Image: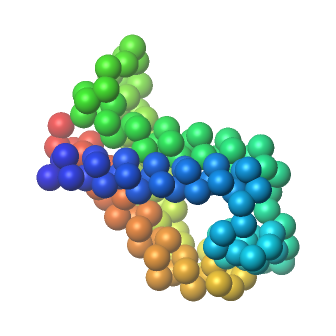
Amino acid sequence: MATFFAVFIFATLSLTAFIHIYWALGGLWPGTDEQTLSKTVIGSNGINAMPPRWITGLVSIGIMGAAIWPILWLGWLPHPLPEWIVTAGMLVLVAIFILRGLGGFLPVARRMNSEEPFATLNLRYFSPLITILGVMMLYLLLSK
């Protein structure tokens, strides 16, 4: 089970990181212009443009780090980090993913990110997937 979870997390977050790189380079999918893209993938009230490209690039690096971290945790990738840092990283990722995932269902989050189609996509797909990833990371953390 741990192998499946780690591979699933890596594949899902790697794909997500690459999509963010695409946006950082000026890509517009799944939108047709910057406004529709921002309303689809960010959804903050009144949003009409994407953040600066360099910020999106930094986000992609963070997502890729989250993709690799469970692999470090399982010892599949050699690294010089002390074990306590790897453990702390897993704890932080579990907290981030579970809080973000479950938080997307809260009325306050839905009010803050009410632009469509993001609001619907977040409720149906983004928040459930992020919660599942967090639970998978929690399983990895507790099973080692």
Q: Is residue 18 visible?
A: yes
Q: Is residue 7 left or right of residue 46?
A: left
Residue that sits furthest to the top in the current view: 80
| In the depicted structure, whether residue 1 falls above or below residue 64 | below
| In the depicted structure, whether residue 116 falls above or below residue 81 | below
Q: Residue at x 21, y 52 (%)?
A: 4
Q: Residue at x 48, y 60 (%)?
A: 99
Q: How many marks?
A: 0
Residue 14: x percent and y percent?
46, 49
Residue 81: x percent and y percent?
40, 18
Along the viewing direction, whichever of 134 and 38 lies nearer the viewer: 38
Residue 67: x percent and y percent?
43, 44
Q: How is the image coloured?
A: rainbow
Q: Is residue 139 visible?
A: no
Q: Is residue 119 left or right of residue 12?
A: right
Quadrant location, the C terminus: top left
Q: Is residue 137 left or right of residue 52?
A: left
Along the viewing direction, whichever of 116 and 34 lies nearer the viewer: 34
| In the depicted structure, whether residue 115 falls above or below residue 86 | below
| In the depicted structure, whether residue 3 falls above or below residue 130 | above
Residue 21: x percent and y percent?
64, 49
Q: Quadrant of residue 38?
A: bottom right
Q: Is residue 141 left or right of residue 117?
A: left
Q: Quadrant of residue 108?
A: bottom right
Q: Residue at x 33, y 40 (%)?
A: 70
Q: Residue at x 70, y 75 (%)?
A: 31
